[in-house]
């Protein structure tokens, strides 16, 4: 049979063909980027995406946390890092400086990182909530719900190989409410945040370790797991 090229390349036929071979066709008029890529590679527009995310957090309306805060606390560290660390929310020092983990808990976090040969140039750090809750109280469920899409998008943009969740607030917000940190810490879990697939580990928050120094030995086990993880 004589093939009719013109007919074969008609849009309807092409769509049927891609469906047949199970190819993910995005219905888009653009000549390039027609197909979904399996791997979410670090792209040149990461900086742009981070800027957009920061802008959208800045545009949050009617939030008492934001209204009472001095600064937004977005992140610190290296956006190209394969390790992302997430805490709870800024405290007074963080609110003052606009950077996460710069107070006493931050000093302990720096020591914990140094113990496994990491520092802020080698990791990327953020929090579940970007504005300081008054009197350093724990963020409410409603506040966490409101900020969850932003931290989820943040993870997706950074696309880390390892995600370290510090403390119960980060764990409950990102993994689930029906779990306790004593049972969940020190285990690798594969999780998806948007298009980012990552290995998650939960460990104790440095502020908790300052109150319960006996637990530092457990945190050391977790840190060694991070150090020894092949990525
Ligand atoms: N505790 C947190 O969870 N985050 C900070 O940035 C500081 C203290």
Image (cartoon, helix red, strand yellow):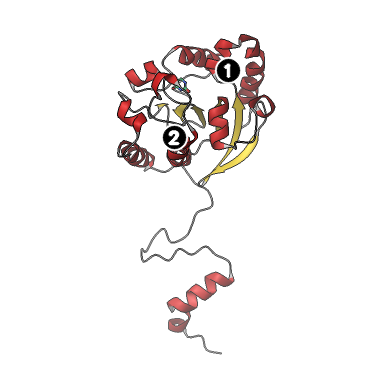
> Which one is in front, 18 or 196?
196
Residue for badge 2: 143
Q: Secondary structure at mark 2?
A: helix
Above or below — where is 187 with respect to 97? below
Q: Give x and y (percent) for residue 209.
A: 58, 14
Q: Is mark 2 within 8 Å of ligand 1?
A: no
Task: Report how far apart the C-alphas of labels 1 and 2 lie in the structure.
Answer: 33 Å
Q: Residue at x 59, y 21 (%)?
A: 204
Residue 197 lies left or right of residue 136; in this view the side is right
The residue sitting at 48% across, 25% down in the picture is: 138
For label 1, the residue is 116
Image point 50% across, 28% down: which residue?
A: 86
Dot 1: what SS?
A: loop
- Left or right: 14 with respect to 73? right
Q: Is 61 on the left-hand or right-hand side of 178?
A: left
Question: 207 or 162, which is in the foreground?
Answer: 207
Estimate the x, y position of residue 9 in percent, counting from the top left: 45, 77
Which quarter of the figure is the C terminus placed in? top right
Q: Earlier in the sequence, mark 1 or mark 2?
A: 1
Please rate how many residues cluster around mark 1, counting C-alpha atoms within 10 Å: few if below 14, some from 14 to 19, many from 20.
some
Q: Residue 85's x, y, as percent?
A: 51, 27
x, y percentage for residue 222? 64, 22
Q: Does residue 154 lie above or below 86 as drawn?
A: below
Image mark for residue 85: none
Q: Is mark 1 within 8 Å of ligand 1?
A: no
Specify few, some or many for label 2: CA neighbours under 10 Å numbering under 14, 14-19, or 20 or more. some
């Amino acid at each position: 049979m004589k093939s009719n090229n013109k007919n074969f390349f008609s849009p309807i036929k092409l769509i049927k063909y891609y469906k047949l071979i199970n190819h993910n066709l995005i219905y888009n008029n653009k000549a390039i980027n027609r197909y979904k890529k399996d791997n979410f590679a670090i792209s040149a527009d990461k900086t742009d995406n981070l800027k957009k995310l920061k802008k959208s957090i800045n545009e949050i309306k009617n939030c008492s946390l934001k209204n009472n805060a001095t600064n937004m606390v977005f992140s610190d560290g290296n956006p190209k890092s394969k390790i992302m660390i997430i805490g709870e929310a800024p405290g007074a020092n963080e609110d003052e400086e606009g950077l996460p983990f710069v107070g006493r808990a931050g000093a302990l976090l720096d020591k914990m990182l140094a113990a496994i040969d990491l520092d802020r140039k080698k990791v990327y750090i953020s929090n579940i909530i970007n504005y300081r809750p008054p009197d350093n109280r724990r963020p409410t469920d409603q506040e966490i719900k409101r900020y969850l899409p932003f931290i989820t998008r943040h993870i997706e943009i950074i696309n880390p190989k390892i995600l370290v969740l510090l403390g119960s607030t980060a764990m409950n917000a990102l993994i689930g409410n029906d779990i306790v940190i004593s049972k969940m810490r020190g285990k690798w879990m594969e999780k998806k945040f948007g298009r980012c697939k990552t290995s998650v580990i939960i460990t104790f928050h440095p502020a908790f370790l300052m109150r319960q120094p006996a637990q530092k030995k457990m945190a050391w086990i977790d840190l060694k797991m991070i150090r020894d993880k092949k990525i």
